Amino acid sequence: MEKMPYRMELDVHFPQRTIDPVIATITTDWRQGLPVLTGAMVTLRELKASDATSLCALLTTEEVSRFISPPPTTVDGFERFIAWTLRQRRAGSYACFAVTLDSTDTAIGIFQLRELESGFGTAEWGFAIGSAYWGTGVFQDGADLMIKFAFDTVGVHRLEARAAVKNGRGNGALRKVGAVQEGLLRKSFQKDGEYLDQALWTILKEDWASRTIWSAADGLIIH
Ligand SMILES: CC(C)(COP(=O)(O)OP(=O)(O)OC[C@H]1O[C@@H](n2cnc3c(N)ncnc32)[C@H](O)[C@@H]1OP(=O)(O)O)[C@@H](O)C(=O)NCCC(=O)NCCS
């Protein structure tokens, strides 16, 4: 997600939304607290205030932040971001997981999911991981957990992602988890005073389900 929905200047409390009873039947109680998702290498769990220190150290570097909305710049700013993610999750419009290695509870990145239409039929996801963990399989493992959470738990039908065309790793990462590039959003993201083109990538629930069946039959991946 190039445009992280969190904006410090708009960080105000708002009343919680009443959960639509129809939606409530197709989802679990993730709005009350995110589940802990365990993969082969990583665990995704809810953010907590104490994650601010490691996230500030890992996500504010030039290589991580180059093609995404500016993250908070201080530990205090990350603490406020984390508090905001919890309020948004309770409101039912957004979820943000910390990425931790199975061997330690330190947050080394985040996966975010936000509602693009009421009821979460269409959603957008985004991710950032400390550069020390790039190319290690951490992303793939976390992405598999996040995609499954979006489709199976939240009830998403269409999962979108936007990546600046210049962001080679971001686009490569989306391609390798099975996203399809649908188009080009010209000059749609402003970064450091420059408007950048973004690629629009999508995964449909049915694409993911058939890929899962194919992979299971092939003995490669079982979601
Ligand atoms: C996006 C991110 C989470 C991906 O994690 P990662 O560990 O780097 O991803 P992976 O290495 O598993 O996958 C990236 C793929 O892109 C490929 N790639 C790397 N550089 C590339 C380039 N310039 N052009 C095309 N593909 C490229 C890699 O080879 C890899 O594919 P492979 O595993 O088949 O070889 C991580 O790079 C990150 O946090 N980036 C900064 C934040 C960001 O840009 N977020 C994305 C917003 S859409």
Image: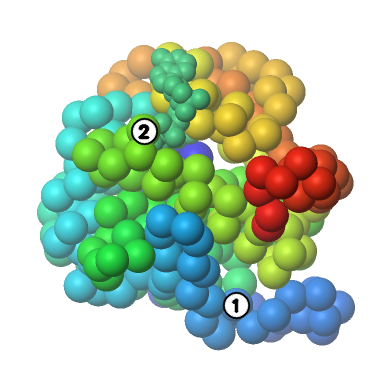
Secondary element at tag 1 = helix
Towards the viewer: 23 or 171: 171
Residue 33 position in % (x across, y down): 51, 81
Towards the viewer: 17 or 111: 111
Q: Can residue 85 be seen in this view?
A: no
- Which of the 4 quarters of the picture holds residue 28? bottom right
Q: Which mark is residue 109?
A: none
Q: How far apart are marks 1 and 2 (CA)?
A: 30 Å
User: Is residue 195 rendered to the left or right of residue 171?
Assistant: left
| CB at disc 2 and ligand 1 closer than 8 Å | yes
Relative to 50, say whether 223 is above or below.
above
User: Is residue 172 rendered to the left or right of residue 191?
Assistant: right
Residue occupying the point 36% across, 33% down: 135
**Residue density around tag 2, few if under 14, some if 14–19, many if 20 or more, within 10 Å:** few
Residue highlighted by disc 2: 135
Residue 140 position in % (x across, y down): 50, 43
- Which of the 4 quarters of the picture holds residue 132? top left
Residue 65 position in % (x across, y down): 28, 34
Relative to 52, say whether 140 is above or below.
above
Towards the viewer: 12 or 203: 203
Residue highlighted by disc 1: 30
Relative to 113, say whether 129 is above or below.
above
Ligand 1's quadrant is top left
The mark lying in front, picked from 1 and 2, is: 2
Amino acid at the residue labelled 1: Trp
**Residue density around tag 1, few if under 14, some if 14–19, many if 20 or more, within 10 Å:** some
Residue occupying the point 20% across, 30% down: 62
Q: Can residue 142 be seen in this view?
A: yes
Amino acid at the residue labelled 2: Gly
Residue occupying the point 29% across, 27% down: 66
Secondary element at tag 2 = loop
